[in-house]
Amino acid sequence: MSELPPLFAPPPPCRQVSVVVPAQNEDENVVPLIEEIDKALKGVVEFEMVFVDDGSSDATWRRLQEARARFPNLVIVRHAKGAGQSVAIRSGVKAALYPWIATLDGDGQNDPADIPNLIKALAVLPGDGRPVMMAGQRAKRQDTWFRRFSSRVANGVRRSLLNDATPDTGCGLKLFPRQSFLDMAHFNHLHRFMPALMIRQGGRVVSVPVNHRPRERGMSKYGLWNRLWVGIVDLFGVMWLMKRPVAPKVTEVEGR
């Protein structure tokens, strides 16, 4: 019997991480965030930073180009026009080199210092051969009451309908195997449903309390319509997918 192919093999230990950050019109935030990621991970794991400029109209791309002179492990990807957060994350994951992916939002509200905490939490989990996603849970949201309210409603509806075992799917801070993400069904707004899709393909999701910071620079890209109501169609689509799991238990592979 040969070894199982990568699709079915458990991911390797988390010693190499690509940090993927989607950013649109975040010229004031990208460089401070790069500096924080570098400080948080240096000496912890081998890592690279993959920033995706999702069609920014400000100086985001120029700031990223300038930062590459200081950070040789910085990879930058540019979309000709905005394609959305989920597409930007996918572009970053496809460009990533390492087997583990950590994601952060580009607005600076996720704390890069929590990435080592996710890695440590992953290391002490009992292994069962399944891929695992470590999902950040914002213990103390630093947002307006309306954003907290809309997020609470959206998370509650998703959790009850999808049974994704995740209290805060909207947190941008996550750690997961690169191949598991690439195996997921791809569609716009995917990032809101990643825990459910990980479960659909036989993985598990573990939530870890993380820090959340107020936005200090720039403006939010989200409001009521693109945070709460736009995902309704996607929600029913994911419900349809969840009833069609793709996680066979493969025991043997011969001829490879």
Image: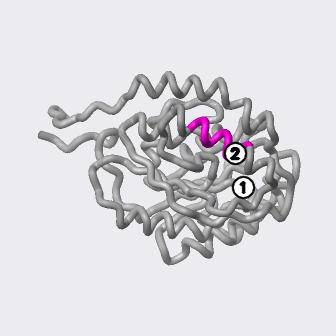
| The image quarter in which residue 63 lies | bottom right
* Local SS, label 1: loop
Q: Residues within 10 Å of mark 2 (few under 14, many from 20)?
A: some
Residue sitting nearer the eye, 23 or 229: 229
Quarter of the picture containing the C terminus is top left
Q: Which residues are magenta?
A: 150-158
Type of amino acid under label 1: Gly
Q: Is residue 227 above or below residue 98?
A: above
Residue sitting nearer the eye, 121 or 181: 121
Dominant secondary structure, magenta: helix
Quarter of the picture containing the N terminus is top left
Residue that badge 1 annotates? 106
- The residue positioned 38% from the left and 43% from the top of the image is 203
Name the mark nearer the viewer: 2 or 1: 2
Residue that badge 2 annotates? 151
On the picture, is 239 further left or further right than 229? left
Q: Is residue 98 above or below residue 192?
A: below
| Residue 73 shows up from this direction | yes
Residue sitting nearer the eye, 15 or 196: 196
On the picture, is 84 further left or further right than 181? right
Is 209 one of the magenta-colored residues?
A: no
Alpha carbon separation for disc pair 2 and 1: 18 Å
- Residue 86 rendering spot, x and y as whole percentages: 64, 39
